[in-house]
Image (cartoon, helix red, strand yellow):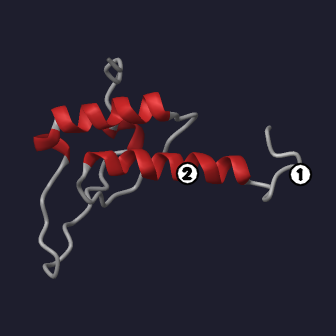
Amino acid sequence: MLNGDGLRYEDEFVRHKMLDFVGDMAVLDLPLWGSFRVHASGHALNNSFLRYLDAHRDDYLEEIVLGEARPQVQEDRAPAEEAPEAMPAVA
């Protein structure tokens, strides 16, 4: 830790990871609406996730128009089943 005064918040590391994830998702340059669960993510994993989304955009991304009814979220599958088996390696 570089901060000589210690942590500013008890959960500062978690806050940092959350901000990293949100910032990394902004690279897609599309508004994302959804729920995300990550475990031990970092910039490399986030980048791999974005590359996967971009490569499979027809399966996972849907354009919506503001002001229209929100799309229905499919909840018949467990979140773990929605994730791909293995993420592609970051190039």
Q: Is 58 in front, or is 48?
A: 48
- Image coords of residue 84 (percent x, y): 31, 29
Q: Name the side, left or right, on which 44 lies relative to 57.
A: right
Mark 1 touching mark 2, by CB under 8 A?
no
Q: Relative to the observer, which residue lies in front, 85 or 54?
A: 54
Judging depth in this view, the residue of 81 and 31 nearest the camera is 31
Q: Position of residue 71 (x, y in %)?
A: 19, 67
Of mark 1 and mark 2, the one earlier in the sequence is: 1
Residue at image location 34% in from the left, 24% down from the top? 87
Helix, strand or loop at mark 1: loop
Query: Could you say which disc has been placed on residue 18 in the image?
Result: 2
Question: Which structural element holds mark 2?
Answer: helix
Image spot of residue 20 (x, y percent): 51, 46
- Residue designated by label 1: 5
Residues at marks 1 and 2, CA–CA distance in whole angstroms: 22 Å
Q: Amino acid at mark 2?
A: Met
Q: Residues within 10 Å of mark 2 (few under 14, many from 20)?
A: some
Q: Give coordinates of residue 68: x percent, y percent.
A: 13, 79
> Relative to 73, does residue 18 appear above or below in the rendering?
above
Extreme residue in the right direction: 5
Measuring 32% from the left and 17% from the top, which residue is drawn there?
A: 91
Q: Quadrant of residue 50?
A: top left
